[in-house]
Amino acid sequence: MDAESKYLAWQRELINDPRSTTELINLALMAADEDDLWHSIDVLRYRGTREVLDAGQNLCRSVCPQERELGARILANLGVPERAFLRECLNTLLGMLRADDDPRSLSATLSALAHTEDDRIVPAAVRFKSHADADVRYGVVQAVTGSDDSCAIAALIELTRDADAEVRDWATFGIGQQSSLDTPEIRAALWDRVADEDNDTRDEALIGLAERGDRRVIGPLLMELRSPEVSSLAVEAAERIADPSLHPALVELESWWDEDPYQLRSALERCLPV
């Protein structure tokens, strides 16, 4: 069975699930592993009915953080393939940010807001950019990534310096690849991360600078391309900056690097000396 057939079979399984909304919510709350949890959530999201909306909103108003977390996850993407009750979901999630102080449900709510677009999201989310919990700060990154609002970009730039590697990684991705802006502040933030101790963060900085044609990236990128742990992002950065000085290092990679031969070939062609 090919990938498309598997997806269609999975979709039919979700749509035809006979269990009630209450049963699915109870199963999600008692799930022993992430797969069982997300299967129940996916069924509810695909169902996307008024009954599921009401149940999700009730969970969001619960005194139990686990129930509020589940409610946020359900409302995050209610209605598949087309969103259902978007306004109601958005208002509930924004209301949770005003009233909640539990890191677990806060992070779920912020992440849920990443699936919606509204002018109120950025100012509501950036209030939590200095929260003590790394999962909450990661939720902020998710909520504001994709927005070119000045407050969103400023928050992401600040979070590229976060103590948590995952937060730094995704904030760097947010300004480097998910924003088309090219400002001195963004370039400076990306440049600050080219020597980051976290490999993923470092690679995101390289590709963000390469995307903006910043030739300072050549030196650090050469070091990455000659590393035994070279990533596909580093090769993609070489492809984007398209500098002939990178060609010898890419040729060397051909002898052993097989993570993405098509991307390597494209990078070699783009960096071919004239």
Image (cartoon, helix red, strand yellow):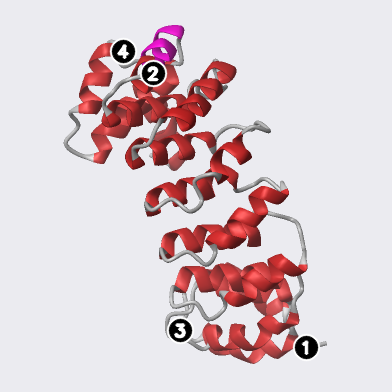
Gap in angstroms between the C-alphas marked 2 and 3: 51 Å
* Residue furthest top in the image: 51
Q: Which residue position is annotated with label 2?
A: 56
Residue type of the residue flagged with mark 4: Thr
Q: Earlier in the sequence, mark 1 or mark 3?
A: 3
Q: Which residue position is annotated with label 4?
A: 21
Q: Residues within 10 Å of mark 4 (few under 14, many from 20)?
A: some
- Which mark is drawn over residue 273? 1
Helix, strand or loop status at disc 2: helix
Q: Earlier in the sequence, mark 4 or mark 1?
A: 4
Which residues, given as a range, are shown in magenta? 50-57
Q: Is residue 269 above or below residue 51?
A: below
Residue drawn at x 53%, y 60% as measured from the top left? 159
For discs 1 and 2, the disc positioned in front in the rendered view: 2
Quarter of the image for residue 74 reads: top left
Helix, strand or loop status at disc 1: loop
Q: Residues within 10 Å of mark 2 (few under 14, many from 20)?
A: many
Residue drawn at x 53%, y 34% as measured from the top left? 113
For discs 2 and 4, the disc positioned in front in the rendered view: 2
Gap in angstroms between the C-alphas marked 1 and 2: 58 Å
Residue 53 within the segment the image draws in magenta: yes
Q: Position of residue 135 (x, y in %)?
A: 38, 50
